[in-house]
Image: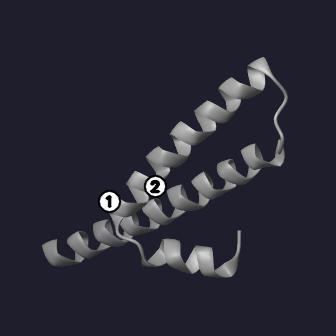
Amino acid sequence: MKRKEKENLKNMSDAELRAQLRDLEKHLFQIKFKRASSPLENPIEIRLIRRKMAMIKTCIGTLERAAAAKTSEVKK
């Protein structure tokens, strides 16, 4: 994944990240379904999609941990 793509993911909101994750999951399902019936033109695409999904999940987790830390500081 390119550096600009990573920076763009870090600047997105939680809702945008989750929407993009859903789109990637649908796309991955479609690619896997096609792969079962015929060979793919670019089999590396599966790996790239999975990696991008992992990066998005990491960004979501980071946002959630930051929000949890913020709420725990407010409670003190």
Q: What residue type is labelled 1?
A: Ala
Question: In the figure, is residue 4 to the left or right of 23?
Answer: right
**From what the image shows, is residue 37 above or below residue 43?**
above
Classify the position of the N terminus by image quarter. bottom right
Name the colouring of the figure: one colour
Q: From where the camera sits, is residue 15 visible?
A: yes
**From what the image shows, is residue 59 above or below residue 48?**
below
What is the x, y in percent for residue 2? 70, 75
Q: What secondary structure is found at the residue carrying circle 2?
A: helix
Q: Which of 53 and 46 is in front in this view?
A: 46
Quadrant location of residue 3?
bottom right
Residue occupying image coordinates x 76% and y 18%: 37
Q: Which amino acid does label 2 sit on?
A: Gln
Classify the position of the C terminus by image quarter. bottom left
Residue occupying image coordinates x 32% and y 59%: 15
What is the x, y in percent for residue 52? 63, 57
Residue that carries the numbered disc 2 in the rendered image: 20
Quadrant location of residue 34?
top right
Q: Nearer the viewer, residue 47 or 33?
A: 33
Residue 15 is tagged as 1
